[in-house]
């Protein structure tokens, strides 16, 4: 899946949110959803949920990435030396969104989250780079996200090209 496809997927996919404040009138894509009460659970297009998150009118349900969850995922990734651990759906998007929110409201939490996020990404990146010379089909690698799969395919192609240039192109 290329970057453009990922962006389109993020724009048209849906996420569950819990409304954190009463909303007198919610209008989405030309449709009036009317009054929405605090605590309501809704499934909304991702782009709408993003706006509500930025305005602090909603919180993600499930799949969201908060600091305790990030610490847990990093610990599990570190304890699994070869395999990738399963990440929540749309993990990278959720983590990037969380960073954006934290940057605006809490510099300390932003710094801590960024450090934890970087640790997890680097642990996963190291494993993905170790897969490339093995020429594994990306569908065989468990728990790889779409973003990681795209990176892996590109890196594997570069590794194969380089191996061919040094006379090791065919096994």
Image (tube, rainbow, N blue to C red):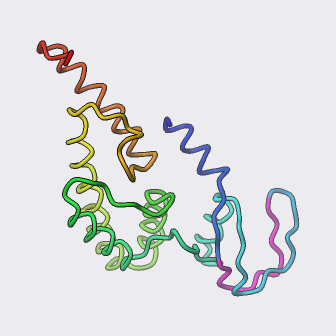
What residue is shown at x 38% (from left), y 75% (from top)? 69
Tell me the magenta residue range.
18-28
Q: Quadrant of the C terminus?
A: top left
Residue 96 picture location, percent across and down: 44, 60
Splitting the image into 4 quarters, where does residue 29 fall?
A: bottom right
Q: Is 1 a magenta residue?
A: no
Picture coordinates of residue 84, whole percent (x, y):
31, 55
25 part of magenta stretch: yes
Up-down relation of residue 171 to residue 108 (above or below): above
Closer-to-camera residue (76/107): 76
Question: Which of 21 and 106 lies nearest the eye of the viewer?
Answer: 21
Question: x and y percent of residue 104 in the render?
Answer: 46, 72
Q: Residue at x 16, y 13 (%)?
A: 165
Q: At which x and y percent is residue 100?
A: 46, 65
Total marks drawn? 0
Residue 30 lies left or right of residue 92; in this view the side is right
Name the residue located 31 percent from the left edge and 79 percent from the top edge. 108
Magenta: main secondary structure: strand
Please tell me whether residue 129 is drawn above or below residue 143 in the rendered image.
above
Quarter of the image for residue 20 reads bottom right
């Amino acid at each position: 899946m290329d970057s453009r496809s990922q962006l389109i997927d993020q724009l048209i996919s849906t996420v569950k949110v819990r409304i954190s404040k009463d909303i007198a009138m919610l209008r989405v894509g030309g449709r009036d959803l009317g009054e929405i009460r605090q605590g309501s659970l809704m499934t909304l297009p991702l782009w709408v949920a993003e706006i509500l998150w930025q305005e602090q009118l909603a919180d993600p349900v499930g799949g969201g990435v908060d600091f305790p969850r990030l610490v847990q995922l990093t610990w599990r990734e570190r304890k699994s030396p070869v395999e990738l651990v399963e990440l929540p759906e749309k993990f990278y998007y959720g983590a990037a969104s969380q960073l954006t929110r934290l940057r605006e409201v809490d510099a300390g939490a932003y710094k801590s989250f960024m450090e934890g996020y970087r640790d997890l990404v680097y642990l996963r990146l190291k494993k993905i780079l170790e897969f490339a010379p093995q020429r594994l089909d990306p569908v065989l690698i468990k728990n790889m996200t779409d973003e990681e799969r795209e990176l892996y395919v590109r890196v594997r192609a570069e590794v194969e090209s380089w191996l061919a240039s040094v006379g090791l192109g065919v096994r």
